[in-house]
Image (cartoon, grey):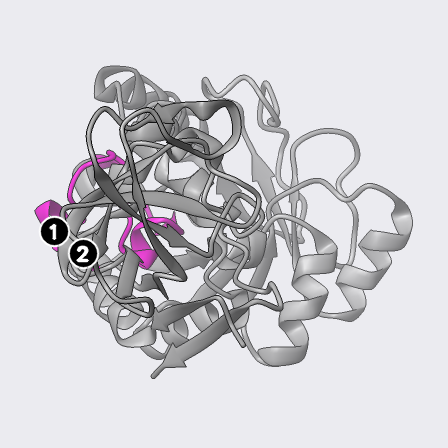
Amino acid sequence: MHRSEITIDLGAIRHNARRLLELLDGAELWAVVKANGYGHGAADVARAALSAGATALCVATVDEGLELREREPEARILIMGPPSEPREVAAARNARLELVVSGGEIPGDIPVHLKLDTGMGRWGLSELPTPTANVVGLMSHLATSDSDPAFARQQIARFREATEPYSHLTRHLANSAAALRLPEARFDAARSGIALLGISPFETDPAEDGLRPALSWRSRLAQVRLLRPGESTGYGRRFVAGRPTWIGIVPVGYEDGFRRDMCGTEILVDGERRRTIGTVSMDAVAVELDRELPVGTPVTVIGDGVLVEQHAKVADTIGYEIACGINAGAVRARRIVHD
């Protein structure tokens, strides 16, 4: 029997893709589906995004691209990370993938995008070489589009100046945050991942930007018990009852992606917000109740107004990390895709 249930709403992903295309005002939308679609399922997210108007797919590694090619035989697929060895370049060429070059020699006989470092300080060329015949795109990556738009605009200006002589090539710079709020970053295409999933790159309510969360996570109360004053729950006795307190045990823990540093976040129990307490275990988390409830009472970990962004704030991290950490492929989590 499954201990929890993860549902992916492809309708929400299609809505988000159309919303991004509306904001991009003529620029293309390229769906970033690396890390198994940020935990949402790369093939499912890709299919939904393409059906809503996305024109390319972006992943991090050649292996991710090869796997995706099996599901999307005709899609344009861009490998954003550097190949680790010549064998990968050959495999990418055979699978009709496109490569990003951020240093070293430009491989031939395969479509290539040159990546310029405009301020990310990571992968990227310090200067653009003269593009060879197989270069089809020019790109860079924004470091602060979600937090410091002034620096992002400096990057945009550097990119525009450096690439203007080659404006006949496809230029792409915007990520999710820039696609949503920096129209000057549009150029010819935007690479968007987190916004497609309805998670805010700004760690705010995604509805502020017209986005709908695609993932929900539900479980149930597996045990309900009364703690008397002085009794505790969980490792380390981090929660000790100061008065008679009903608690429920939810059978999800850090193995499933409910992280230890998410303790104190709120989830829904029977539709009401309740605080998680104690130490998150590998297989369980405790929640404080206001009354005795029956075993089997429904619990919503994400969804119905409980946002990934809320859990990220408690854990002092970002929504990306929460989403990627949810172990939707675990044997004990049932995964449902709603088309």
Q: Which residues are magenta?
A: 184-212
Instruction: State which quarter of the image contains the N terminus.
Output: bottom right
Residue 204 on the magenta segment? yes
What amino acid type is highlighted by mark number 1? Ala
* Secondary structure state at the residue bearing disc 2: loop
Per the image, label 1 sits on a secondary structure element best described as helix
Q: Is residue 140 visible?
A: no
Residue identified by numbered label 2? 211
User: Residue 331, how many percent across, how many down?
Assistant: 62, 68
Most foreground residue, 59 or 153: 59
- As for residue 222 lying within the magenta part, the answer is no
Q: Nearer the viewer, residue 282 or 22?
A: 282
Q: Please give the name of the residue rendered at 15% of the width and 48% of the height, measured from the top-left corner.
A: 273
Q: Is residue 296 above or below residue 169?
A: below
User: Mark 2 and mark 1: span between their CA atoms?
Assistant: 5 Å
Identify the residue under disc 1: 207
Callout 1: 10 Å neighbours few (<14), some, many (20+)?
A: few
Which amino acid, mark 2? Leu
Q: Position of residue 113 (x, y in %)?
A: 59, 46
Q: Are marks 2 and 1 in contact (CB under 8 Å)?
A: yes
- What residue do we see at 58% from left, 22% from top? 122
33 horizontally vs 173: left or right: right
Vertical position of residue 249 compared to residue 161: above or below: below
Q: Is 251 drawn above or below residue 15 in the view shown?
A: above
